[in-house]
Image (cartoon, rainbow, N blue to C red):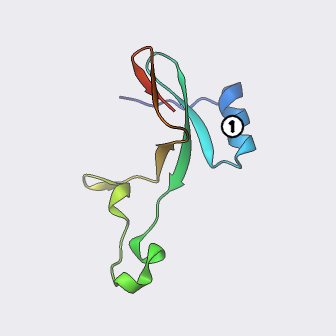
Amino acid sequence: MTTILVKDALRASVEAASGGKQTVLYTPKGQPTFVNIIPKVSIESMNPALGISGVHPAFKQGDREIPYLYVGTYQGCVLNGEVLS
């Protein structure tokens, strides 16, 4: 599945209001869902006392690293058969 991020008016306003910490993604049916953008972090930056280094496992998909995660801003609900935030 390919994700195309186009700055429509809703997405642009959410990103501007949140200082770039939130955005809007669209479902296959075109419904907006509001998400928080969580940037990639290393384990040592979260808790140096662990003595573990490297990228946090949440930011790994197989052998590749992803730059951020999208986490729903609001409690999920089902609308027209799709989960939205």
Give the amino acid at mark 1: Val
**Residue 13 placement, left or right of 69:** right
Name the residue: 26% across, 55% down.
63
| x and y, in percent, of residue 1 in the image | 35, 28
Name the residue: 40% across, 52% down.
66
| x and y, in percent, of residue 21 in the image | 63, 49
**Residue 56 placement, left or right of 46:** left
| x and y, in percent, of residue 29 in the image | 46, 15
Name the residue: 47% across, 75% down.
45
Q: Say above or below: 1 vs 20.
A: above
What residue is pinned by disc 1? 14
Name the residue: 45% across, 31% down.
3
**Residue 79 placement, left or right of 52:** right
| x and y, in percent, of residue 67 in the image | 46, 54
Q: Quadrant of residue 33?
A: top right
User: Which secondary structure lies at badge 1?
Assistant: helix
- Find the residue positioned furthest to the left: 62
Q: Say above or below: 85 vs 50.
A: above
Q: Quadrant of residue 43?
A: bottom left
Q: Say above or below: 76 vs 29.
A: below
* Numbered marks: total: 1
Specify few, some or many for label 1: CA neighbours under 10 Å numbering under 14, 14-19, or 20 or more: some
